[in-house]
Amino acid sequence: MGVRVSSRGRVEPFYAMELLKLANQKRQTGMDVISLCLGQPAAGAPAVVRRAAIDALASGSPLGYTDANGIPTLRAAISAHYASGYGVEVDPARVLVTTGSSAAFTAILLAAFESGDAVAMARPGYPAYRNVLGALGCQVVDLDCGPQTGFQPTVEMLDALPAPPAGLIVASPANPTGTIIEPGRLAAIADWCSGHGTLLISDEIYHGISFGGPTASVLQGSDRHVAVGSFSKYYCMTGWRVGWLVVPTELVRNVELLLGNLNLSTPTLSQLAAVTAFSPDARVELDAHVARYRANRDLVLRRLPDIGVRDTLVPDGAFYVYPDISHLTDDSLGWCLRALDEIGVALTPGVDFAPLRPGRVSATDGSRYMRISTAGAAEQIDEAFDRLLSWV
Ligand SMILES: Cc1ncc(COP(=O)(O)O)c(C=O)c1O
């Protein structure tokens, strides 16, 4: 008898992770690989965070499980962060600490939606939303977003749906495009969701990495929406695996029970250290990284014409650029695999974010885009473009 394998567990690959795996394999064979495929800061956690972790280890604490919804000091620190950063009062009881924002998504999608529910998201959008929704039996509703709307959804797109979806996920700044939903537009989307019984889940994990434009939190308008945060991006604590959720009161208990069953708790050492990540000392260090991401973005925009790319939408934040490479290929996955194989440059194919739909070709198809991460070192980006220039 064969081993049982569920169809819902057969999710699409997360190609950025696949490319990373291949890049690591190539490195092991001695190839000099430049990785621009992952959205992870090159710098480590701020010094105060590392100090707090060292102190916690030195204290001899057993670092056992914590409350499923996180240690009270961290939940209070997150609540205080909303007060100081956004001017909004968030009851710490509505804050739940999670194992990266990835665990926050699994918990909130399970807590809020039934199997079969329709949940809308931008296309292009972060692949794990789509893949996890699929595994949970939810129906993904694509909102096709092109450069005209900054690759972000609009109220008009929601109005055009045949029926209001059970949920809507938005991300601002977004992955893969780095675009921000301007506060007035986010408020209009939030109002639309409130008026149509749609739960709005706002992925705010790239907040802090903005190059000038304001990044509003969905919590500023109402306590009926969900905000997701993370220490992985601005706070440079990617592998520490700490994120958070702020949910409406009615969802708190169910999310807590789900977290307690799914993960038991978030890594204790990481939680203790994360409390210090909001401190002024940490901010000085982290803001210097943001200045570097911006310089890297400008470098990529300067070098894209070298490979024939013109008119790329200028990202407002995060650490990605999402150029149209349709003059080079209509198969972004094959192209990225060849770039890795032949010149040792790892990039992410657009199909990760806008997978192809059988029988339906559209201008937003990811087969004509790639994503470049600008989170790393400028010299590496420059070298990658030197290689790409001679290759294309
Ligand atoms: C838009 C978006 N949401 C969520 C995540 C998950 O991040 P983490 O689990 O490290 O918080 C990522 C990671 O790249 C992302 O880009």
Image: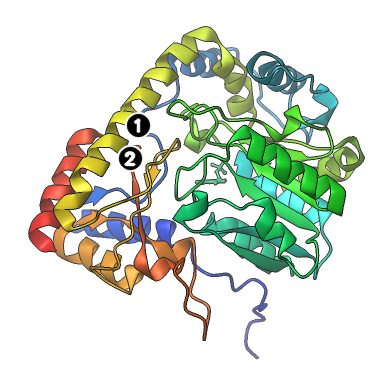
In this rendering, the answer to whether 137 lies above or below 221 is below
Could you tell me which residue is drawn at 35 percent across and 37 percent down?
375
Point out the residue furthest to the right here. 250
Could you tell me which residue is drawn at 54 percent across and 54 percent down?
126
Left or right: where does residue 342 sit relative to residue 84?
A: left
Going by the numbered disc 2, the residue's amino acid type is: Thr
Of the four image quadrants, the one with ligand 1 is top right
Point out the residue furthest to the bottom here. 1
* Disc 2 packing (10 Å; few <14; some 14–19; many ≥20): many
Q: Secondary structure at mark 1?
A: helix
* Disc 1 packing (10 Å; few <14; some 14–19; many ≥20): many
Residue 102 screen position, x and y as percent: 61, 47
The mark nearer the N terminus, 2 or 1, is 1
In this orientation, does residue 93 appear? yes
The front one of 32 and 92 is 92
Q: What numbered label is drawn on residue 337? A: none
Residue 262 screen position, x and y as percent: 74, 50
Could you tell me which residue is drawn at 37 percent across and 18 percent down?
288
Q: CA distance from mark 2 to mark 1?
A: 6 Å
The residue carrying mark 1 is 293
The residue carrying mark 2 is 374
The front one of 365 and 127 is 365
